[in-house]
Image (cartoon, rainbow, N blue to C red):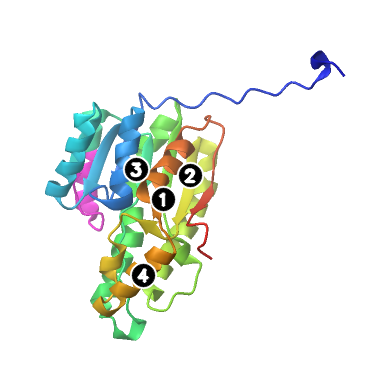
């Protein structure tokens, strides 16, 4: 066999350019959200940063603009329908129709179910699940308009805790399981409209405020665990999101799990 007889390898389709994309990332004040927002901006997207604390959002925005990126600070509470609606108007007035939504805002309290105040459990569900519902519902009309002419993505950051039995994480795990189910159903409803939907399920991720959610007596155990089981840095999660949203328009990655190699 000569070279001319060898089968030709098909060239992969070109990645989607990010320079004209308009993104919103919730929970963008720190951790995974800040890393994703910063990476999308570095890729060329205009990024709206949404979280409750303006001061922390402004620090992330400053890092983005200092390197030539475009960022919009949008203080809002994802648990408030009115606050999210106002944010949707602000983003549209500044950037136009969104074509990339990352629902990342989340809350975790680790304590046995019977020991946790009901208000804490309600707050966990409000942020982790109702927040995703509120934000998605508010921005879905813009995503639909964008999908008619360009690549459009909806990414919900869930957690592998939604599938695993972790004592002390009953409400958190339940809320994340609900987010994953919501995401899969949204994909079934929106696929025909050209909106790509992805369920992103992180495992142990470093660079977040995870340890702060554990009781004081358990924080040293978490820190020891991180030593023996190195966590995935938030930059790797951001890199994965960057890859997902830059795939050719007809390619969707519906579900992704990212965790340390030794985590089981």
Asked if residue 226 lies in the magenta stretch, the reply is no
Point out the residue furthest to the left here.
55
Name the residue that disc number 2 marks.
197
Quarter in which the N terminus is drawn: top right
Q: Seen in the image, is 16 located left or right of residue 89?
A: right
Name the residue that disc number 1 marks.
156
Residue 17 visible in rendering: yes
* Residue 182 x %, y %: 46, 56
Do the residues bearing badges 1 and 2 touch, measured as CB atoms within 8 Å?
yes
Secondary structure category for the residue under label 1? strand
Q: Which residues are magenta?
A: 74-89
Q: CA distance from mark 1 to mark 2?
A: 8 Å
Q: CA distance from mark 4 to mark 3?
A: 27 Å
Bin the neighbour count of mark 2 within 10 Å (Cα to Cα): few under 14, some 14-19, many 20 and up.
Answer: many
Q: CA distance from mark 1 to mark 3?
A: 12 Å
- Work out whether mark 1 precedes mark 3 in sequence or the reverse, and give the earlier one: 3
Q: Seen in the image, is 73 located left or right of residue 181?
A: left
- For marks 4 and 3, give the one nearer the viewer: 4
- For marks 2 and 3, give the one nearer the viewer: 3
Q: Which mark is residue 36?
A: 3
Secondary structure category for the residue under label 3? helix
- For marks 4 and 1, give the one nearer the viewer: 4
Residue 93 visible in rendering: no
Name the residue that disc number 4 marks.
224
Q: CA distance from mark 4 to mark 2?
A: 36 Å
């Amino acid at each position: 066999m000569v070279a001319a007889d060898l089968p030709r390898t098909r060239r992969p389709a070109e990645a989607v350019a990010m320079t004209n994309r308009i993104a919103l990332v919730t929970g963008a004040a720190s951790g995974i959200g800040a890393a994703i927002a910063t990476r999308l901006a570095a890729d060329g997207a205009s990024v709206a940063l949404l979280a409750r604390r303006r001061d922390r959002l402004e620090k992330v925005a400053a890092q983005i603009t200092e390197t030539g990126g475009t960022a919009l600070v949008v203080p809002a509470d994802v648990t408030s329908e009115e606050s999210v609606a106002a944010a949707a108007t602000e983003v549209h007035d500044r950037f136009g129709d969104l074509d990339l939504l990352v629902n990342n805002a989340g809350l975790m309290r680790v304590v046995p179910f019977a020991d946790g105040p009901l208000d804490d459990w309600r707050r966990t569900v409000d942020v982790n699940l109702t927040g995703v519902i509120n934000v998605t519902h508010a921005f879905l009309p813009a995503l639909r308009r964008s999908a008619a002419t360009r690549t459009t993505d909806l990414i919900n950051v869930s957690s592998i805790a939604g599938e695993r039995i972790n004592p002390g994480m009953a409400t958190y795990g339940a809320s994340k399981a609900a987010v994953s189910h919501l995401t899969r159903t949204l994909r079934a409803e929106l696929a025909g409209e050209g909106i790509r939907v992805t369920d992103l399920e992180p495992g142990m991720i470093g660079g977040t405020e995870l340890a702060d959610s554990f009781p004081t007596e358990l924080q040293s155990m978490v820190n020891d665990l991180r030593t023996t089981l190195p966590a995935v840095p938030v930059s790797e999660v951001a890199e994965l999101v960057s890859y997902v949203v830059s795939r050719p328009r007809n390619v969707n990655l519906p579900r992704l799990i990212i965790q340390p190699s030794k985590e089981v």
